[in-house]
Amino acid sequence: MFLEHGSGARDARLVASTLRVDTRRGLRCPPGRRHKTRGRRDISAPVPSAAPPGTVLAMGHGMHHPRRLLPLLFVLHAVTACINVPDIEPPPGENEVDAGTTPDAGSDVPESLTLLTSFPAGGSTQVATGTQFTLTFSSPLDTGSLRVEVTPQVSFRPIEWGNRGTVATLRPSAALEQNTTYTVTVDAKALSGPSLTGTRSFSFSTTGPAPDTLPPTLLSTTPSHAAVGVPRDTLIEILFSEPMDRDSVQTAFAITSPAGLNSGSFTWNETSTVVTYSLPSRPDHGTSITWQVSTFAKDTAGNPLEDTEQREFRIVRQSSAMLPLLYSASGTVTADSSGRHYRPFNLYDLERIGDNSAHQSSRLFLSFKLDALPPELIRINRSTVRWWLSSQTGQPFEKLGPLLMESVDVGESLPQSIIEETEYPELAAAYDAIPLAPALSIGAADTGTPGVFDVTPFVSQDWASRMDRNHRSQLRLRFTQETNYDGVTDELRSSVSSHATLAELEVVYEHP
């Protein structure tokens, strides 16, 4: 147990309820009061009432000197004690990060549990003594696991939960002390099991009757300074250390580059500590935006920012890639009336969709590899497949239609074979593969040289599953009816003699 000795009995306070005993090296006391014993548990020599403020008294728990205990007991009886927990250090290997309204930067790992935001925000000053505490987590909590410790000690009413267990609101049973720095330490577990990681503690100071002469500061900004890959519909959010004069901040704010983005709108939180600016229009892809808040911005007491604060970020860029056909897993697979399957060509020659006079039905497969796309790809904006149709025999759309384009997974390759050969299970599996998504219906007027089809939903899903599918994106073209058994050939045909390219895939995507 330690005592900090002030100028009088009323100024003495209990600094921490900790018993520190060192049986090998003795007790550690302030300079001039060192009292060593070896192998014994003892109490340091008492400090007289004239000792300067900050003098620490240490007490062991195996007292062998009762007379030395009496002065200490007298001091304990006379002073008002309060708990003062030492600052909590972040876990080993983790940097100390402010628990403000902006989430810590880092990898987006869905399985982890982090404290996204807190109110009051870490580093806030002039916080109202009647404020409530709001903690927002990245995942729903096991509500029974939440532990919130505040130093100096604060008692709370029952916790209120919101947003499916991700937001906890704690209302103090009594008003906070004025002009006091509070340290909040949080621990919890997610419903899914992981314990809280990252920022677990933050501090703030309450308001008081003393005049506010401290200049406000910017605690955090969103997007962060020098961020890249920022969405085009981003908002600019600024967190101040204390309540601000709204008009002065809005006058002091300006987007200095590019021109034409200063006619947006402002919104504030209730405490006037967070301002959000909405851009008047979406910036072009790849635009670098620079903004500032000048020293004209003032807090509610009239104190201005000490320096003009400037930040910049870059909007997400957009690029495109043309992906060639992977012919080892492309081409026609034909099924005869006996249920046998074959693929006549392993290079692009003549491809068919429909039925023939022998009641054989053909389906066309188009395969592409997505590994040419960058791994840092953020979003696929548009995917377009171009398919070159050479000719039509009979009336396939009238007799067998409609024509369907489906997303499928048929593996790395389709083996070449002829009808007389042994059945290949891979061909039968591809022919009958279950679609991965609802089909795209194609009419006769949609085909051409080439026909152009929007397959963005298919390719976006394939990109999301690229690790499981080895970066494959595969399509199947088939008529709804395999054959009508009329002995007449009704087919769509693509021939290398008419067009050197069977199909290609263009992907337009966003990246940092």
Image (tube, grey):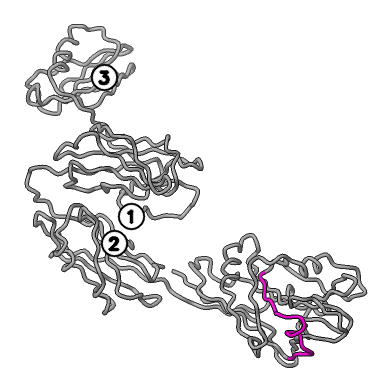
Tag 2 and tag 1, C-beta contact below 8 Å? yes
- The mark nearer the N terminus, 2 or 1, is 1
Task: Determine whether 46 is above or below 128 in the image.
Answer: above
Query: In terms of image quadrants, where is residue 76?
Result: top left
Tell me the amino acid under the disc marked 1. Thr
Residue found at x 21% / y 16%: 44
Residue found at x 70% / y 79%: 403
Image coordinates of residue 282 in percent, x first then y, are: 36, 75
Tell me the amino acid under the disc marked 3. Leu
Q: Does the segment drawn in magenta span residue 86? A: no
Sort mark 1 into few (<14), some (14-19) or many (20+) by Cα contacts within 10 Å. many
Q: From mark 2 to mark 1, how far is it between C-alphas?
A: 9 Å
- The mark nearer the N terminus, 2 or 3, is 3
Which residues, given as a range, are shown in magenta? 391-407
Mark number displayed over residue 102: 1
Image coordinates of residue 291 in percent, x first then y, are: 25, 69
Image coordinates of residue 16 in percent, x first then y, are: 24, 26
Residue found at x 67% / y 78%: 325
The residue where tag 3 is placed is 27
The residue where tag 2 is placed is 237
Which residue is more in the foreground, 120 or 307?
A: 120
Sort mark 3 into few (<14), some (14-19) or many (20+) by Cα contacts within 10 Å. many
Q: Is residue 410 left or right of residue 276?
A: right
The N terminus lies in quadrant = top left
Tell me the amino acid under the disc marked 2. Glu
Q: Does the segment drawn in magenta span residue 399? A: yes
